[in-house]
Amino acid sequence: MTAWNPAQYLRFGNERLQPAIDLIGRIPLESPGVIYDLGCGTGSGTVLLKERWPLADVTGVDASNTMLERTQTLESPVSWQQADLNTWEPGTPPDLLFSNAALHWLDHHEVLFPKLVSMLAPGGILAVQLPANFSAPSHTSIAETVQSGVWRDRLEPHLRENPVLEGGAYYDLLSPLSAKLDMWETTYYHVLTGPDPVVEWTKGSILTPLLPLLDEAERESFLQGYGSKVARAYPRRDDGKTVLPFRRLFMIASK
């Protein structure tokens, strides 16, 4: 299992949370009774769900014990559950299945998304945000660095170059199962500070499964090579900050 680093992930906690805020704001539910947050991570978005619907039974689900340990610092009446999302099933049919930046870690979306809709209570909602930045240099430079190094055989099987389908494919999957389907894309322009901020961003997300497979010297060499690529793609601006455009796909399917 991938060992997630909550501190690294939360270096950009506000930026990572904003899509969850935007998704929650578009969910057309008045008083859901049962809510699950799939891939809840450190639980920040789960707490927002509870704040939006305080009478709901809200459960955050994640496979990472290190991420879930961080949720114990949160003062919120939310339940937490450690489970593999590949095999997870709800104890009670939910009125809302919510997932912010997690389902791209799972394969076979053509099976996964209809399965999630089937779990919903009648009239329930599936609300999902997926990173859609995989064709941008922040992500393509990872594959280039993997494929040009001595570590290629070790790292390449763990690459996730295109884990998210195009929006039209999700429409085709969800529209036959939905009374209403709302989909949109947003590109966030994250203004980052500090040295190598794009490297630090991806170290908390897409690089997480790769770096532990390298020894210390290899890791330094890998990050140096990757860092030089993204530094050219995302140059520091005149004010010393770095702008990272990041595209995200949203969908709200009403059963």
Image (cartoon, grey):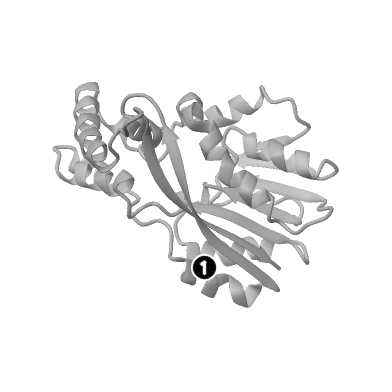
Residue at 74 percent of width and 25 percent of height:
75
Task: Count how many numbered circles sit on residues in the image.
Answer: 1
* Of residues 160 and 246, the one drawn nearer to the viewer in this rendering: 246
- Residue 84 position within the rendered picture, expressed as x and y whole percent measured from the top left: 55, 45
Name the element at disc 1.
helix
Measuring from the top left, give residue 87's x and y in whole percent: 57, 52
- Name above or below for residue 53 compared with residue 4: below
- Residue 72 location in percent, x, y? 66, 24
Residue name at image x 43 percent, y 58 percent = 164
Q: Can residue 154 be seen at all in this image of the molecule?
A: yes
Q: Position of residue 130 (x, y in %)?
A: 50, 53
Residue topped by disc 1: 170
Q: Name the quarter where the C terminus is drawn.
A: bottom right
Is residue 97 found left or right of 200 in the rendered image?
A: right
* Whether residue 1 is visible: no
Q: Identity of the amino acid at label 1?
A: Tyr
Q: Quadrant of the N terminus?
A: top left
> Residue visible at 28% across and 49% down?
140
Q: Residue furthest front?
A: 238
